[in-house]
Amino acid sequence: MIINCIAVDDEPVALKLVASYIEQTPFLTLKGTYTNAVEALKAIHAQPDIQLIFLDIRMADLSGVELARIIEQSGKKKSLRIVFTTAYDHYALEGFKVDALDYLLKPFSFVDFSKAAAKAYDYFIMLQNSSQSNNLNPADHKAEKNYIYLKIDYQLVKINTEDILYIEGLKDYVKLFLKNHDKPLLTLTSLKSLEEKLSPAGFLRIHRSFIIARNAVKSVTKNTVQIGETTIPVTEQYKIGFSDFLKDWQ
């Protein structure tokens, strides 16, 4: 697979370095370099085959984070990904809020760059495989997908959905409680976004802050479920779906 890239940085020396790193990476193709985000945005509209942006954050007129938000709202979130490059580590949280694929802190080496590029390669391979799978006829699916990918500790991690007990939303973060894990996994995403990745046949939202794995439930009342030692309330907003779930217990 070849990934089409652009580099955006208002510092000529930094821009030249990133461009040289791209050109040294066999599976990356440099489609352009830009010294500001506005010109980069024009290029993105003009070249729909661009897949990856190595993007500086702190720039005049339009910042890298602002450009990322524009891309997110444009519907290209899956097909156009961003690796942030910046000299300011306090922007890391902002980068992950806009779902950046990775975050490179200047000055970074070719080794650091290669690790980020490898993450991008793995992501686009996964996206390609997912697209091919979705194009199959329903009869061709031997089994429903039993895993999801989540960004945890600066890397994409494959999570087997069969291992999930329940999920708790905490504003900008989500905690996944898994079988045979003493501590939950923490990922920067929304509960709604995660809910869309999970099969309704295996999972049920019963609260604004909780999604449960149906098979993990050990006991129920009209207003709660018990998973392990944890009791989770069912709120009025989700009572209809929960009522259907209760029918299997009768």
Image: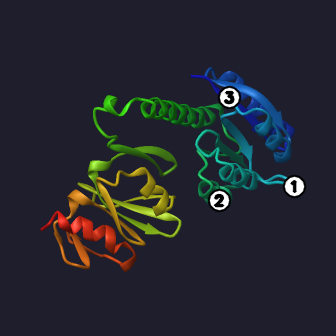
**Which residue type does callout 2 highlight?**
Glu
- Determine whether, in the image, residue 62 is placed left or right of residue 28: right
Badge 1 crowding class, 10 Å Cα cut-off, few under 14, some 14 to 19, many 20 or more, is few
Query: Residue 167 location, x and y as percent?
Result: 36, 63
**Which residue type does callout 1 highlight?**
Asp
Query: Residue 250 location, x and y as percent?
Result: 12, 68
Residue 94 circle label: 2
Residue 4 circle label: 3
Q: Earlier in the sequence, mark 2 or mark 3?
A: 3
Query: Residue 29 location, x and y as percent?
Result: 69, 24
Foreground of the two, 117 or 168? 168
Residue at x 72%, y 52% (from the top left corner): 70
Foreground of the two, 67 or 57? 67
Q: Secondary structure at mark 2?
A: helix
Q: Is residue 6 visible?
A: yes
Residue position for label 1: 61
Quarter in which the N terminus is drawn? top right
Q: Earlier in the sequence, mark 1 or mark 2?
A: 1
Label 1 and label 2: CA atoms lie apart by 18 Å
Label 3 and label 1: CA atoms lie apart by 25 Å
